[in-house]
Image (cartoon, rainbow, N blue to C red):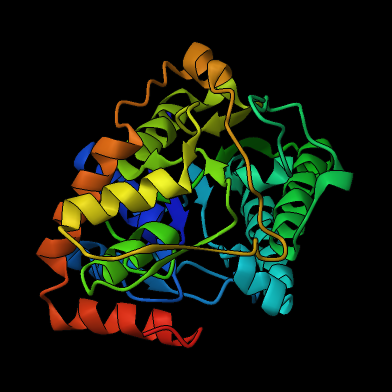
């Protein structure tokens, strides 16, 4: 069983949650990120600040990891439509991490992919892991994840790297004050601003951060038994963005209105995951519904946003797109 785990993207939403959980469970964790971890001082002190777009030459005197969990990515679909170069960055980071693993003899690689891989879904359809095709790719972000998955399979065939791929779906909750839809809607609702839905009938599978982390930890613990597999980590339930907006307005006591705009280029309108493989092989059982998760997310947001550095962090994230 892996005892020392290197986590890339450790300062992000999933990275912070997973790093904290593994440390609490007694693992030795080597966090790597280009940014500081603003959520946890202990994680931040341990973090190796590194630009993974460049080859990874050394991790200093840290113990050789038994496993790498590769979460680092530019992870905004619309952002990578506007700035497609950042999709290439995602591929480069995966390549550099795999080269580091090959050169240092690290065989276990857990890679975070995305539900965007599946493309648009039909009403009522639940996507199984095998249900992918390159012709369904709708954005540079999706292409970066699809090609990264292909690269993992290539390194398995050529260099005996043992991969597990997870496809995450709309992870939300703690450790996120970005321009993603949940923290963005909370930010606007608290200011009684209009919540804009990009697409009338968007229906997606949202995953609360604790459920996502639980699924990842289950893979870490069972890695050698499930290597070579791909897993959907989601809830298996589709929720309308209109309902999400309504619940956030209710939880914040807001007077915000809901407005419908056109779907943005590259975005998916429908996705619901089939999580039966994760249930069977991992014992994965997501517990938090979106309605309950919204309440938890609002409670957490209200606790942290009083800190000036967190408030400034979100304002900077929104300002990148001209949102205030």
Q: Is residue 169 above or below residue 280?
A: below
The x and y percentages for residue 213 are 36, 39
Left or right of residue 308, residue 318 in this image: right
Measured as percent of width and height from the top left, residue 126 is found at 63, 25
Residue drawn 69% across the image and 51% down it? 102
Foreground pick, 284 / 246: 246
Left or right, 265 with reference to 59: right
Residue sitting farthest toward the right: 135
Front one among 175 and 200: 200
Q: Position of residue 314 (x, y in %)?
A: 32, 77
Determine which quarter of the picture holds residue 319. bottom left
- Quarter of the image where the C terminus is located: bottom left
Q: State the residue lying farthest toward the top.
A: 280
Give 120 or 211, whichever is nearer the viewer. Answer: 120
Q: Quadrant of residue 163?
A: top right
Give coordinates of residue 220: x percent, y percent: 44, 32
- Left or right: 215 as drawn, with respect to 230: left
Q: Is residue 234 visible?
A: yes
Residue 3 makes an appearance in the image: no
Give the residue at x 67% y 74%. Answer: 86
Could you say which is closer to the camera, residue 104 or residue 193? 193
Q: Which image quarter is the N terminus in?
A: top left
Figure quadrant of residue 44 = bottom left
Residue at x-position 73% and y-position 78%? 85
Q: Is residue 243 above or below residue 56?
A: above
Vertical placement of residue 311 versus 98, above or below: below
Which residue is at a point 28% across and 70% down the rendered structure image?
Answer: 187
């Amino acid at each position: 069983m892996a005892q020392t785990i290197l986590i890339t993207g450790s300062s992000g939403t999933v990275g912070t949650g997973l790093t904290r959980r593994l440390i609490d469970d007694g693992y030795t964790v080597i966090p790597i990120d280009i940014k500081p971890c603003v959520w946890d001082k202990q994680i931040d002190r341990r973090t190796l600040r590194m630009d993974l777009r460049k080859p990874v030459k050394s991790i200093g005197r840290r113990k050789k990891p038994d496993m790498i969990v590769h979460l680092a990515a530019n992870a905004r679909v619309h952002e990578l439509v506007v700035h497609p170069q950042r999709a290439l960055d995602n591929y480069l980071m995966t390549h550099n991490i795999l080269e580091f693993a090959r050169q240092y003899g690290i065989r276990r690689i857990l890679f975070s992919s995305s539900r965007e891989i599946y493309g648009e879904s039909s009403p009522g359809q639940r996507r199984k892991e095998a249900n992918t095709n390159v012709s369904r790719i709708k954005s540079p972000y999706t292409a970066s994840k699809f090609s990264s998955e292909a690269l993992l399979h290539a390194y398995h065939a050529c260099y005996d790297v043992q991969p597990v791929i997870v496809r995450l779906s709309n992870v939300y909750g703690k450790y996120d004050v970005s321009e993603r839809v949940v923290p963005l809607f909370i930010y606007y609702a608290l200011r009684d601003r209009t919540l804009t839905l990009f697409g009338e009938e968007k229906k997606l599978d949202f995953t609360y951060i604790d459920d996502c982390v639980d699924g990842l930890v289950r893979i870490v613990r069972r890695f050698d038994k499930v290597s070579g597999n791909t897993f959907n980590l989601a809830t298996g339930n589709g929720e309308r963005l209109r309902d999400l907006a309504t619940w956030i307005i209710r939880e914040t006591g807001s007077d915000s209105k809901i407005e419908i705009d056109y779907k943005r280029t590259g975005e998916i309108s429908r996705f619901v995951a089939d999580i039966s493989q994760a249930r069977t092989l991992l014992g994965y059982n997501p517990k938090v519904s979106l309605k309950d998760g919204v309440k938890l997310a609002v409670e957490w947001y209200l606790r942290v946003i009083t800190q000036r550095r967190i408030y400034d962090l979100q304002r900077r994230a929104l300002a990148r797109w001209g949102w205030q």
